[in-house]
Image (cartoon, rainbow, N blue to C red):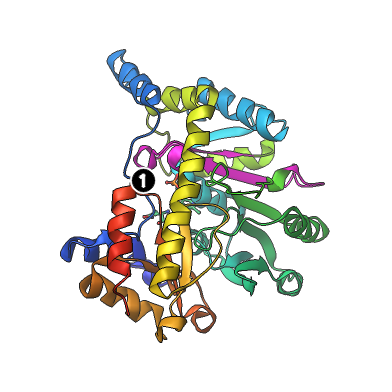
Amino acid sequence: TVPRLRPFASTVFAEMTALAGRYDAVNLGQGFPDTDGPPRMLEVAREAIASGLNQYPPGPGMPVLRHAVADDRRRRYGQDLDPDTEVLVTVGATEAISATMLALVQPGDDVLLIEPYYDSYAAAVALAGATRRTVPLVPDGDGFVLDVDALRAAVTPATRLIVVNSPHNPTGTVLSRAELTAIAEVVVEHDLIALTDEVYERLVFDDAEHVPLATLPGMADRTITVSSAAKTFNATGWKTGWACGPEPLIAAVRTAKQFLTFVGGAPFQPAVAHALTEESAWVESLRTDLQRKRDLLSAALTDAGFGVKRSAGTYFVCADIAPLGETDADAFCRALPERIGVVGVPVDAFVDHRESWSTLVRFAFCKQDEVLRDGARRLASVR
Ligand code: PMP
Ligand code: GLN
């Protein structure tokens, strides 16, 4: 392995899922649902295969999906995207993130990440040979807010791009319009590019509102918006995502994408197009279900003695182990499968400054109720 990729040899998700298998533990670690997406979406994919849609689709993605993405974002957010030049179908959000980084940053550039950050961002920065700098979320009540002063202070002449992720993995924070506006002001003032990862855009709870960064003043021309079918339609294994943005930036991302995967899987594309167009009622029931599951798991963690953080979106709730007398989330999570048969992920796996995040554990609630109840029973004996 070349030095810049050595820190990324294994992922925390693979490690924790392996531990879940070894101890037959309830896996609240890796975030993936254990039920299928909309039945008609699955059928459309089967029909696509049966009808011979089994060869390379067009490079930018099938028109039916690019149009569905543009229409969906126009309907829900008022975004104005040309499906032919401003939408690119990718192999999941993950490829969109890596291709954006490879296309738009280079050695000598700094990339700002909000800490904690989803693990693929740091690896994508390393793939591009750039340098990452972090700006922290900080505790605020039972949740987190962006440290806007730290953001302003982190920008240097080398800064090229900032990665924003809201709803936020791992904390479940949904950035407010005010926080996103502050980010937008910094981006415009310093002539940066923003990469906004909105894979959990539909999974917001209570009165939280998802505000796409690209809809804020000055941002449409300098923002790559990334999302995917994974979380919206319970289809993490389909690896069908997209990048949206202004034509010159999307053209650059397409250049990189061509030589990463060339194209994504054909039969999934009409199926996801169907889902974006026709399955909003299904998505709403997923959202309300997840909100209830969040409540179920949050209550179980509180009852077990954890200090539970407020999750306003995503699949995840974070819990502090300090009230349990524990000091090291990494050691705690490595021991937990054998100790009580539950897997969680230490939040310090998503950070550069481990000292600030050493007692937080992320638990996923995107699981069937019986799995969550089994997890809750086991968590009750953690003390
Ligand atoms: N971004 C975030 C914040 C995620 O949590 C995930 C994975 N669940 C991804 C990107 C990757 O999405 P995809 O599976 O579409 O590549
Ligand atoms: N995004 C999922 C999570 O955060 C897992 C993705 C992965 O395994 N790379 O748990």
Q: Is residue 350 visible?
A: yes
Which residues fall within the magenta stretch? Answer: 215-244
In the displayed structure, 70 sits above or below 137; it is above
Q: Quadrant of the N terminus?
A: bottom left
Residue at position x 34%, y 48% from top?
A: 369
From the top left corner, tell me how far across and down residue 18 is, in percent.
23, 62
Which is nearer the eye, 168 or 133?
168
Quadrant position of residue 71: top right
Residue 5 position by quadrant: bottom left
Q: Position of residue 152 (x, y in %)?
A: 76, 70
Residue 212, percent across and down? Answer: 68, 45
Instruction: Confirm whether residue 62 shows in the render.
Output: no
Q: Amino acid at mark 1?
A: Pro
In the image, 28 versus 250, the foreground residue is 28
Image coords of residue 379 (percent x, y): 32, 68
Q: Which residue occupies the foreground of this view, 91 or 177? A: 177
**Label 1 belongs to which residue?**
33
Q: How many marks?
A: 1
Quadrant of ligand 2: it is: bottom left
Please rate how many residues cluster around mark 1, counting C-alpha atoms within 10 Å: few if below 14, some from 14 to 19, many from 20.
Answer: some
Left or right: 250 with respect to 338? right
Q: Could you tell me which residue is drawn at 42 percent across and 86 percent down?
A: 327
- Which secondary structure lies at badge 1? loop
Answer with left or right where residue 233 lies relative to residue 34: right
Depth check, front residue: 262 or 200: 200
| Drawn side of residue 196 relative to residue 97, left or right | right
Ligand 1 closer than 8 Å to label 1 CB: no
